[in-house]
């Protein structure tokens, strides 16, 4: 396949319909490792965490970081799931940042007005790159899917995270952002006709909101059950509760949404403000395990959040729920 000057090999292949293996697309997970057989490849972000999985003395590199300096041949050992071919093909977009807002002390939301509009499936993400920050960062779209000309994102502050430091330093409205997407295969497909389970921690709720928005628009919970578990540390860390409350209220009891606080109980005022929501104390994967006992029939599960939370939820879904791998969906870009 062809690769433009200074273009990441992974992005070049994906936009041309080549099924290449990846998870994060930003140098974090190491899934897209390949080996240079011949020809020159140029290193990208030297600090990419995924480089720790490489044997660079054997010519291994990350497709999402390296560019081609000329004709080259690379060996890709992994396989891309064939269902990726049915998803919208990723392309480059320019976006203008707007609607910058602080949701909590360590969570901000913003929109990107993109041209061209992005066709994406609920649960997918995009890679955002901004001036002065080396390497792109992956964030799930919050809004409903389709041919969207405005994308909504949420970012949680991460110590040492260059993008989060950049976005929290000042109101970034009107900044031009380079966007590549959509990416990811942890998507909601109404035609699968399954009950829905979402387990999210912190900003991992972003993709779940997109899934719920699509399900709500399609009247999905008129004939299916849904269970959503949203974990944060304390009552001061909650956000998007109004949206979640509206989704639950509109489902006529078929969508149960539980907010799990790992430290402390929910204040009575919070419960009164969002009567359609449930509140619990404990780590979100443990709260989900207790509430879901015996309720895993015909379920597809979505998981997103900090890596320790995702690991705990995946163990529970595999060991306790006994869900098959095809019915557990998550993306590795925490």
Image: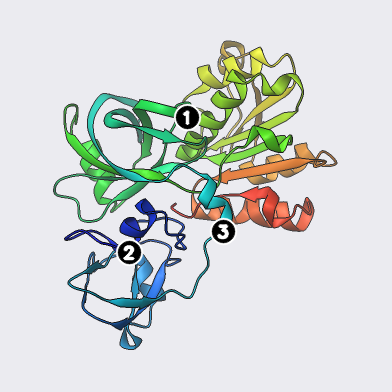
Assign a secondary structure to mark 1.
loop
Q: Position of residue 236 (x, y in %)?
A: 46, 28
Instruction: State the scheme by which the image is colored.
Output: rainbow
Q: Residue at x 28, y 30 (%)?
A: 114
Task: Give the label on residue 145, or none.
Answer: 1
Spot the residue most to the right.
294
Left or right relative to 225: residue 312: left
Q: Left of 240 or right of it: where is 113?
A: left
Residue position for label 2: 1
Q: Is 315 located above or below residue 55 in the figure?
A: above
The nearer-to-camera label among 3 and 2 is 2
Label 1 vs label 3: CA separation?
Answer: 22 Å
Residue 270 at x, y percent in the picture: 56, 17
Measure the alpha-carbon separation of dots 3 and 2: 19 Å
Q: Earlier in the sequence, mark 3 or mark 2?
A: 2
Instruction: Say which element carries label 2.
Output: loop
Q: Residues within 10 Å of mark 2 (few under 14, many from 20)?
A: few
Whether 107 is drawn above or below 242: the answer is below
Of the image marks 1 and 2, the number of the one nearer the N terminus: 2
Numbered badge on residue 81: 3
Position of the N terminus by quadrant: bottom left
For the question of whether residue 323 can be seen, the reply is yes
For the point 26% across and 67% down, the residue is: 66
Labels 1 and 3: the sequence-earlier one: 3
Please tell me whether mark 3 sits on a helix, a strand or a loop.
loop
Neighbourhood count class around disc 3 (C-alpha, 10 Å): few under 14, some 14–19, many 20 upward:
few
Instruction: Give coordinates of residue 17: x percent, y percent.
Output: 42, 54
Q: Position of residue 192 (x, y in %)?
A: 70, 38
């Amino acid at each position: 396949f062809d690769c433009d000057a200074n273009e990441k090999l992974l992005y070049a292949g994906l936009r041309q319909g080549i099924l290449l293996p990846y998870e994060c697309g930003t140098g974090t997970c190491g899934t897209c490792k390949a080996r240079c057989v011949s020809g020159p490849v140029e290193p990208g972000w030297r600090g990419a965490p995924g480089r720790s999985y490489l044997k660079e003395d054997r010519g291994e590199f990350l497709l999402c970081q390296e560019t081609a300096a000329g004709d080259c041949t690379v060996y890709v050992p992994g396989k891309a799931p064939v269902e990726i071919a049915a998803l919208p093909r990723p392309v480059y977009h320019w976006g203008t940042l707007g609607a910058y807002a602080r949701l909590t002390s360590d969570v901000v939301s913003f929109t990107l007005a993109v041209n061209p509009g992005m066709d994406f499936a609920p649960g997918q993400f995009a890679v955002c790159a901004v001036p002065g920050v080396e390497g792109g960062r992956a964030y799930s779209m919050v809004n409903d899917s389709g041919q969207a000309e405005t994308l909504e994102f949420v970012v949680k502050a991460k110590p040492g995270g260059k993008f989060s430091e950049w976005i929290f330093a000042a109101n970034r409205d009107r900044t031009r952002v380079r966007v590549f997407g959509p990416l990811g295969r942890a998507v909601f497909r109404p035609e699968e006709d399954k009950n829905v389970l979402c387990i999210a921690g912190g900003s991992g709720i972003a993709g779940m909101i997109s899934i719920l928005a699509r399900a709500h628009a399609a009247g999905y919970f008129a004939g299916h059950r849904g269970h959503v578990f949203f974990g944060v540390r304390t009552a001061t860390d909650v956000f998007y509760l109004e949206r979640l409350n509206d989704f639950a209220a509109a489902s006529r009891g078929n969508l149960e949404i539980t907010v799990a606080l790992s430290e402390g109980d929910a204040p009575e005022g919070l419960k009164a403000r969002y009567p359609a929501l449930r509140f619990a104390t404990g780590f979100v994967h443990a709260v989900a395990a207790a509430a879901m006992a015996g309720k895993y029939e015909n379920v597809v599960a979505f998981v997103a959040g900090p890596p320790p939370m995702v690991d705990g939820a995946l163990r529970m879904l595999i060991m306790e729920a006994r869900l098959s791998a095809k019915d557990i969906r998550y993306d590795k870009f925490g």
